[in-house]
Image (tube, rainbow, N blue to C red):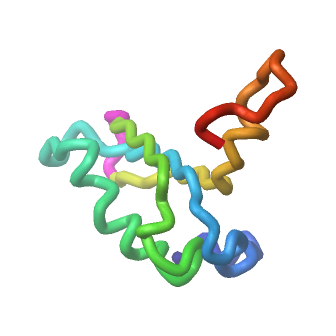
Amino acid sequence: MKHLAEKSLTKMPWGDRPICATVASVISVRGRRKDADNLVKGLLDAMQGFLYSNDGQIQCLTSRRFEYAGSRGYYLVAARPVLPVTEDVIFDDPAPPPFA
């Protein structure tokens, strides 16, 4: 979390809104191979209270594992608020969608 603070990010920029998170776990080929889903569990818990109030706010999660020849692993994280479906889908019919 030290690196996030150095980037001058606003603490919990989305408040209590649902968010989508994308995590790339970059791991050394020299280490023990871990499942992509297990790599992010601790990270998501650690970001709680900094990027979001509770990891239950994560509505969408994409996780990828990349292996490289280096000796230290790291994470690349992108997060964004979930948009209402009306902002994400284009309808030709002016009537509201049945699931809105």
Q: Residue at x 44, y 41 (%)?
A: 62
Residue found at x 16% / y 42%: 33
Q: Residue furthest right?
A: 94
Q: Is residue 60 left or right of residue 33?
A: right
Is residue 67 in the magenta section?
A: yes
For image coordinates 13% across by 47% down, the residue present is: 32
Q: How many marks?
A: 0
Q: Residue furthest top?
A: 92
Give the magenta-colored segment's residue range: 66-71
Q: Residue 57: horizontal and vertical position, in percent?
A: 50, 66
Residue 72 x %, y %: 35, 54
- Residue furthest to the left in view is 32
Horizontally, residue 93 falls left or right of residue 88, namely right
Q: Is residue 96 left or right of residue 5?
A: right
Is 100 drawn above or below residue 21 in the view shown? above
Establish if 40 lies above or below 8: above
Residue 84 visible in the snapshot: yes
Query: Which sits in the foreground, 85 or 75?
Result: 85
Left or right of residue 21, residue 80 in this image: right
Q: Position of residue 82 (x, y in %)?
A: 64, 51
Give above or below for 98 relative to 59.
above
* Image quarter of residue 93: top right
Question: Would residue 68 be visible to someone looking at this image?
Answer: no
Q: Residue at x 57, y 79 (%)?
A: 50
Q: Quadrant of the C terminus?
A: top right
Residue 8 spot, x, y in % from top left:
76, 75
> Residue 96 occupies which quadrant of the picture?
top right
Is residue 15 covered in magenta? no
